[in-house]
Amino acid sequence: MEHAMALRTDAGTEEAYGPGLAEIYELVYAARGKDYAAESAEVTALVKERRPDASALLDVACGTGGHLAFFRDHFATVEGLELSEHMSAQAERRLPGVRVHQGDMRDFALGRRYDAVSCMFSSIGYTRSPGELNGALAAMAGHLVPGGVLVLEPWYFPERFLPGYIADDLVRTEDRVTVRVSHSRRHGDDVPIVVHYIDARKDAGIRHFTDVHRMRLFTREQYETAFERAGCSVEYLTTGRFGCGLFVGVRA
């Protein structure tokens, strides 16, 4: 049940490890078998059921572009938004011609609107308060055309959170072994997830570093209220592919 997306890491970690953090992120989730293609296809279907002529999509907190790589098969124009400089750079390298804006999902203005906005990988859990949640949804909805579709993958609802959860990954390649272990603990609705990495490479030796993901638990009602305040209808869909379900809204 650990959250995946390293949208807002501690600044010291990202500065110290730089592009390597984005590289490890990709290694870990490739090893987990995350199916970006199938997830992107499911989100696309939800969008086009509600707006059949949708042709432009913005993926908020796009990370290294895992979903964008497949969204561009379904939409004429795709763009991304990502706070991490190294993640956005990695996305642009893997997706030539796709624009990735560097910005904070809580408050951004790109000067254009899209038929669809997505926010995947439970990245919304990085907002720190109901006010920040409302701000993020308002910013996303503000980039939709009237009738545009907003698809949001939430993080866990409070009643589903398992305190003390430990996640572990071991990734082996011909010249590299990477270990990732994390532990999460709940303090009210705040959940700091402490992550330790050991990265051993034949050409660089062994490096160890620690990252802290500071997450927030929101209720279903808080998500729905944020959609409504942003001027969108909202429905919550349970789906086997997305363990936390999906919220789908349409801008009035």
Image (cartoon, rainbow, N blue to C red):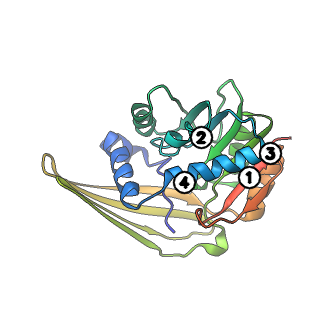
Drawn side of residue 49 relative to residue 83, left or right = right
Q: Mark 2 or mark 4, which is nearer the start of the sequence?
A: 4
**Which corner quadrant of the image does residue 55 belong to?**
top right
The answer to the question of whether label 2 and label 1 lie on touching residues, with beta carbons closer than 8 A, is: no
At 44% across and 35% down in the image, what residue appears? 85
Q: Are marks 1 and 3 in contact (CB under 8 Å)?
A: yes
- Tag on residue 38? 4
Alpha-carbon neighbours of circle 4 within 10 Å: few (<14), some, or many (≥20)?
few
- Residue 56, placed above or below residue 27: above
Judging from the image, what secondary structure is the residue with disc 3 in?
strand
How far, Cα to Cα, is label 2 from label 3?
16 Å
Amino acid type, mark 1: Val
Q: Along the line of sight, which residue is nearer the eye, 107 or 224? A: 224
Q: Nearer the viewer, mark 4 or mark 1?
A: 4
Q: Which residue is mark 3?
A: 250
Q: Nearer the viewer, residue 242 or 16?
A: 242
Residue 120 visible somewhere in the drawing: no
Q: Mark 1 sits on what residue?
A: 248
Closer to the eye: label 4 or 2: 4
Indicate which disc residue 105 carries. none
Q: Which residue is mark 2?
A: 59
Q: What is the CA distance from the residue labelled 3 to the residue labelled 4?
A: 22 Å
Q: Dot 2, crowdedness within 10 Å: few (<14), some or many (≥20)?
A: many
Q: Earlier in the sequence, mark 3 or mark 4?
A: 4
Q: Earlier in the sequence, mark 4 or mark 1?
A: 4
> Of the residues shown, which amino acid type is indicated by label 4?
Ala
The reply to whether dot 4 and dot 2 touch (C-beta < 8 Å) is: no
Question: Residue at 64% across / 27% down in the picture?
Answer: 110
Q: Amino acid at mark 3?
A: Val
- Location of residue 231 with respect to 124 vertically, above or below: above
Element under disc 1: strand
